[in-house]
Amino acid sequence: MQEFPENSFKFGRVLAQVLCHTRELAFQICNEFERFSRYLPDIKTKVFYGGVPVAEHKRILKSECPHIIVGTPGRVLQLVREKELATKGISACSANDPCLAFAPEDR
C-alpha cells in the first residue's frame, strides 16, 4: 500500500486486485485486508466470487467501489468482460496461484 499516492484512495476506483482459486481463500484474504484497514481507514476492500448474485457485485462496483478487490478468476473475469470492472486503473495485481495470472492463450 506504500506504493499508492495518498490521494488515490479518495477517487473511488479499484487500485489493486488479488485472485484466489477458491472463494474460501478469497474471503480469508479479504478479511486480512479488512484487519489491516484499521491502520488505513480510507481503504475499502470487497470480495467477489461465484455463488453470490452478480447483480450485487455490479451494485458494489457502481455505488461503493472498493480500492482492493479479492476474488475468484471466474467472477472477476465475468465482471471485466461485462465491462463492470475497469482494469485500466489497477496498478497492483496478485495471484495466489501463478497459473491464475495468465489465460491459457497467454502462456
Image (cartoon, rainbow, N blue to C red):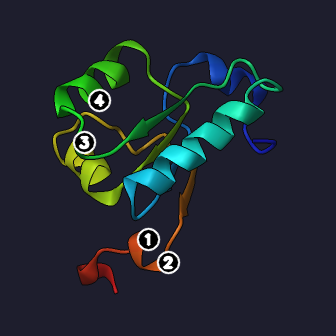
- Asked if residue 53 is positioned above or below residue 49 in the image, the reply reads above
C-alpha span from label 4 to label 3 = 8 Å
Label drawn at residue 98: 2
Of pointers 3 and 2, the one earlier in the residue sequence: 3
Mark 1 lies on a secondary structure that is helix
Label drawn at residue 101: 1
Where's residue 84, x and y in %? 25, 33
> Residues at badges 1 and 2 in contact (C-beta under 8 Å)?
yes
C-alpha span from label 1 to label 4 = 22 Å
Label drawn at residue 79: 3
> Residues at badges 4 and 2 in contact (C-beta under 8 Å)?
no
Where's residue 67, x and y in %? 55, 31
Residue type at mark 2 is: Pro
The residue positioned 53% from the left and 67% from the top of the image is: 96
Of pointers 4 and 3, the one earlier in the residue sequence: 4
Of pointers 3 and 1, the one earlier in the residue sequence: 3
Q: Nearer the viewer, residue 16 or 88?
A: 16
Q: In the rendered image, which residue does mark 4 sit on?
A: 57
